Image: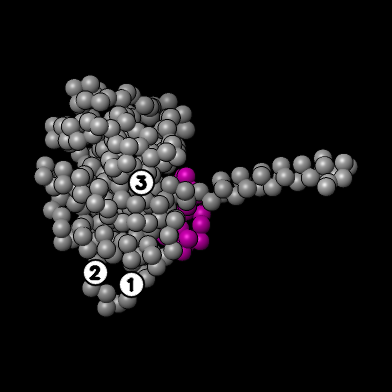
Amino acid sequence: MTAPGLRPITRKLLELTRALRRVNRACSTFQTFAEVLRLPKRQMTKLAFPLQELQRQLTPDARLDLHVKIFDPSLEDISKAESVFTATGRNRIEYLSSAVRLDHAPDLAQPEVCFIGRSNVGKSSLIKALFSLAPEVEVRVSKKPGHTKKMNFFKVGKYFTLVDMPGYGYRAPEDFVDMVETYLKERRNLMRTFLLVDSVVGIQKTDSIAIGMCEEFSLPYVMVLTKIDKSSKGHLLKQVLQIQKFVDSETQGCFPQLFPVSSVTYSGIHLLRCFIADITGNLKTDGFGQLELNT
């Protein structure tokens, strides 16, 4: 039993411990790229280019290429792209609307990207991390799988629209196939589909639904590997190699380079922002091969 005189001290110690934990959690995430650039080189590379970090673990005679140089922007490129995702008075980032059918979706001319994945793959958490520089944007994250039941549209200034699609698999909406298939097939301004795969468990049977749709409709898509903070280096490398082998041998429309990310540590988030800004036409190449912001 705690002596009465010690109780206030104990309470203060508990409050201090909780406060320190909150500070540690905040310090473990690097939401702005300026914070990443201040880190030691090895740690910076791990956060900015996680696939390159995995490539280093391969033996020189490894037969599988992780294609780390296909999209290989400079640190300056990534810094420039960050402004696209930063909310300002001139760059409003906001939730627009939700829809269960394509004819209910907002009619916008600007480029569009969509995020799709299995229930509990961490899709909403990833979108929230991408929008961390626009804290007023509400992206609902639930611990229960299958929380997203509609297509949720977010407008990123004058640059592009991002669509959070319902998850497939467990607790998927009954009309999932009709809703998503129609969108993927008929949405004219859709520039790229981001297919999320849980890096802990790899490609599952349910993922074949989304992969099949993208391949059938000849859509350009990208595989984003979520939750890379949840696995050991060895397990993560094993999963990445298996997924890379699948992409190289079993797909036609998938971008060859994988994008491993963590919504907890922000590893890979900055590179993914840069890639999205690039493929939506909001970065342009000058004569020196450097990316410039399309204002």
Between marks 2 and 3, how big is the CA–CA gap?
26 Å
Q: N-terminal of the two: label 2 or label 3? A: 2
Q: Quadrant of residue 241?
A: bottom left
Is disc 1 surrounded by few (<14), some (14 to 19) or many (20+) residues within 10 Å? some
- Residue 75 falls left or right of residue 28: left
Quadrant in the rendering for residue 160: top left
- Per the image, the residue denoted by label 1 is 58
Task: Give the mark toward the camera: 3 or 1.
Answer: 3
Question: Measured along the vertical axis of the image, is residue 286 above or below residue 124?
Answer: below
Residue 59 picture location, percent across and down:
32, 76
Q: Would you name the residue on which mark 2 appears?
A: 64
What are the residue bounds of the magenta stretch? 30-45
What residue sits 39% from the left and 68% below the top? Answer: 234
- At horizontal 47% and vertical 45% (from top left) the residue drawn is 31
Report the residue marked by disc 3. 121
Evaluate if marks 1 and 2 touch, with contact meaning CB atoms under 8 Å apart.
Answer: yes
